[in-house]
Amino acid sequence: MSYIRSKFEHPQAQQNTLGFTRRDYEGSISTLCAGCGHDSISAAIVQACFELAIEPHRVAKLSGIGCSSKTPTYFLGQSHGFNSVHGRMPSVATGANLANRDLMYIGVSGDGDTASIGMGQFAHVVRRSLNMVYIVENNGCYGLTKGQDSATADVGSKSKAGKENMYQPIDLVSQALQLGASFVARSFSGDKEQLVPLLKAAISHHGFAFIDVISPCVTFNNHPGSTKNYEFVRDHLNATGTVDFIPMREEIITRYEKGSTQDVTLHDGSVISLRKAAEDYNATDRGQSLQKVREADTRGEILTGLLFVDTDAQDVHSVINTSERPLNSMSEKELCPGSEALERINESLR
Amino acid sequence: MKPTDISDPEFFHQVVDCQYACPAHTPVPHYIRLIAQEKYTEAYMVNWESNVFPGVLGRTCDRPCEPACRRGRVEEEPVAICRLKRVAADNKEDYKHLLPKIPKKKNGKRIALIGAGPASLTVARDLMPLGYEIDLYDEQPAGGGMMRSQIPSFRLPIEVLDEEVNTITDMGVLTHYNTYVASLKEILDKDYDAVFVGTGAPRGKDLDLPGRKEADANIQIGIEFLASVAFEHADSIGERVLVIGGGNTAMDCCRTARRLGGKDVRIVVRSPFEDMKASPWEKDDAMAEDVPFYNNHVPKEYVVENGKLKGMKFEKVEAHYDADGKRSLVPTGEDLVFFECDDVLMAVGQENTFPWIERDLDIEFDKWDMPSVDKVTFQSTNPKVFFGGDAAFGPENVITAVAHGHQAAISIDLFCKGESLTERPAPFTNLVSQKMGIHEWSYDSEVAEDVRYAVPHAAKEEALQDRMIEVELGFDKDLGYKEAERCLNCDVQTVFTEARCIECDACMDICPTECITFTPNGDEEELRPRLIQPANNLEQPLYISDELKTGRIMVKDEDVCLHCGLCAERCPTSAWDMQKFYYSVTKAG
Ligand SMILES: Cc1cc2nc3c(=O)[nH]c(=O)nc-3n(C[C@H](O)[C@H](O)[C@H](O)COP(=O)(O)OP(=O)(O)OC[C@H]3O[C@@H](n4cnc5c(N)ncnc54)[C@H](O)[C@@H]3O)c2cc1C
Ligand SMILES: Cc1ncc(C[n+]2csc(CCOP(=O)(O)OP(=O)(O)O)c2C)c(N)n1
Ligand code: SF4
Ligand code: SF4
Ligand code: SF4
Ligand SMILES: [Mg+2]
């Protein structure tokens, strides 16, 4: 019996600008099924944080319940984390973010955790534009409870027992677009070349960044009748284009044909460079994005890549005008100014 | 790149770094696992089959396996492979019943072996079970060659050597000890079917400097000194001894001198410390016995007063290296240095010499007076005469002599059967899955993090009293177990089956040393740098799969794979499997 990951790493392991190796960003060894797409997403998050040279102590990982929601234990072992209640990750994230606006928030949820029990919470956290990355590890089923169809399962998609799903799926990408998310993307756990730059862009984005990641459940939803198995997904992917993420430190060297590239400069000066598959795709036009997602869906394709981004979005702190200084760094005296102050506020409202 | 052909035994063979580097290709991880399982006798026999002298080699081997050991690339120090061999030898139980049976009825072929060193003894070990009649000649009073005459007993106790030499001679070898062969012609005239020359490189080099003749009484050639000590012709030396030279012979000379009365014993050597030929551990052992090293000192003159050696003069030099790394020793211009001494031991190299081989026997000799010997068959230009060990290509070590002996035995057997010597038998190989359950393997896949354990030594004061006291005490069973656990089981191979892979990346993500990459194909040169961790160690192979469904290939850099089996445990489809690869060099017969 092994299942122990050796501490030995590659003797010439590459280091980022902080002197960390990729393995410095890993967490405990995963207890998910071998081959689970969720583990690939964890590895992509590790890769993105490594490449961005993020200081682990500046990250908070939040999740609900599900195989997907277990994964924050398996990456960024030196970061903060809160594994909350089923479907309630958005509330916990909101609370944490309001208390300390200086951390980076990575929320990990499942299609069950988000599109079923947590749908209401999801809608409101998008609407409030919380500054966070919200990842749905979408396997079309409730993995942790043995593979029941979830609300993102396609009509006609078969469960492992052979039963067809009868209900219309909820498309979380369309929901996020409609609810006003300022960064919306879709990817596939088996395509790190696309997923890693998307994650880097999402982390660097100021505002609510949503990524729907199709992530096959090898145990309960990787059979031929499913529309979320490795093979089906690979065969039906259609990318809006190739995403390059260029941190602000670096110069943009590669230049592609005019018209086929769309550069989006983020808040912090970094650039998302979208090498578009189709000339007419405009990733900054919300209405058009919604339309393209729908069109692809009607064709039976899964549109992936960067779908929409709005770099001028305001996050919840600017909307409600909170203090620049994080609340958690204030003293009790500042936070509870006393009955006199309360009296004054009450008076002003009379 | 083309997909790797894993049906070629040489691919997985090279992944087992230690075994690959061992001249006799001893299945190292296999015997180390047996030691961990306390199966010492079996571990001993695995060794005996391939290297014939496990007890001797477990103490004295030059250990080319250790610098090759994967563990040394993953952390600081390789596995103590050599000293684990000794654990098997020290703890073995009766093994006589496991030795090959010697046929009573002989095959009618007679072979002469000249010199009773490890090379000849190995030939005897391989040919006796096949029914050959063997005459073994040596001028010394007992078998073992330089293992007896040169390797001092504080490194190799006589009993250990005797036991392993006797195992072979007890097979019924006709020994002719105390017999110097003065003429090869005479031997050939005795109508042997083949003759094997394993006479070593018996001549020690001298340094002819001013004063050499006058000081002769107090200058000895190192290997002659060691032999006379071993055969008890000499048991004392002066208090102040200069040992000239920086190889292993010099180390043995100074440590022997320390035990025969030498109080101020010094190593004086031309080269810088780092360039000295002696193995690092032999240098350490000499220094631990209070022998100072004077590097960058070139001997210039023996100083003689009143007809007696007073000391020696040396010129101080500096090593300069040119662009190609070629060294030259440039005098510093300082005055010559004078060291007083009573005796000088000359350990500046060894040479071959064949005064007893007539030059009209169709054996070709080159301009250095070395016989022309085929590197594969060990046959000389006289088809009946074979060479091996130090006699073939110059001084090496015991394990090389053994490896030569095995190959020469194959050639002699083929020759006696009238078969072609160039059609060598293929190695025996075997590849077996180790899977027992989802996270269960029939080998201990967990990687121990322990650093290398040191072998305990006898107290210095005591050891220096008596040259028969062995300095290294060896690992006990407990330490042996712990050290054995450091082995990475490099013979348990990661075997990949393309057709099963669904490209989920799980193996790539879990691998602790990031050996696996899924990527578009390319030329090796272009591929190596763009793997997840660039594969910069060009000596280590890439394992390449056929094209996968997405058009990519799987590339595994074998360099620092820990053989931990996690890739196979995380693979949902068993596209990876851990399979034990057994490789053994086929012997004569
Ligand atoms: C001081 C010293 C220390 C060493 N330490 C080590 C060590 O720690 N580890 C290691 O691996 N190697 C060591 N070596 C090297 C090793 O001993 C030799 O490489 C090895 O023994 C060579 O084996 P061989 O079979 O070729 O011949 P040898 O061992 O040299 O045996 C040749 C035999 O042939 C006999 N012989 C020669 N000519 C004739 C003749 N005409 N008639 C009859 N008999 C003859 C000699 O008496 C001798 O017994 C050491 C060498 C020296 C000099
Ligand atoms: C309040 C509550 N209701 C129901 C459950 C049972 N439950 C646990 S996980 C899960 C579904 C998880 O599905 P998803 O979010 O898609 O995660 P996956 O396991 O598929 O990654 C459910 C219904 C629960 N833990 N808590
Ligand atoms: S049950 Fe499915 S979702 Fe859960 S770990 Fe296993 S493969 Fe992943
Ligand atoms: S056995 Fe597999 S997981 Fe372990 S180091 Fe080797 S390639 Fe990596
Ligand atoms: S874990 Fe298995 S199926 Fe997955 S990529 Fe590796 S070899 Fe292929
Ligand atoms: Mg799910």
Image (cartoon, coloured by chain):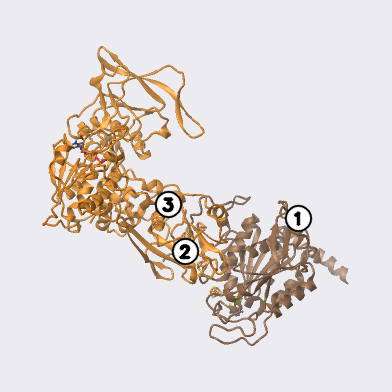
Q: What residue is shown with label 1?
A: A269
- Is disc 3 surrounded by few (<14), some (14 to 19) or many (20+) residues within 10 Å? many
Q: Residue furthest left?
A: B104
Total residue callouts: 3
Q: Which mark is residue B70?
A: 3
> Is B173 above or below relative to A147?
above
In the picture as drawn, the residue positioned furthest to the top comes out as B306
Picture coordinates of residue B587, whole percent (x, y): 26, 55
Q: Where is residue B99 drawn, in percent x and y?
A: 19, 56
Q: Quadrant of residue A315?
A: bottom right
Residue positioned 48% across, 72% down in the render: B573
Check the residue under mark 2 and report the chain it is in.
Answer: B
Query: How far is the residue under mark 3 from the one under mark 1?
Result: 45 Å
Q: Nearer the viewer, mark 3 or mark 1?
A: 3
SS at circle 2: helix
Measuring from the top left, give residue B514's x and y in whole percent: 52, 58
In this rendering, does residue A28 appear at all? no
Q: Dot 1: what SS?
A: loop
Residue indicated by mark 2: B566
Which chain corresponds to the colour orange? B
User: What's the residue type where badge 3 is placed?
Assistant: Arg
Q: Which chain is brown?
A: A
Name the spot of residue B176 as percent of width and height, x first.
Answer: 13, 41
Q: Is mark 2 within 8 Å of ligand 4?
A: yes
- Locate ligand 1 by image quadrant: top left
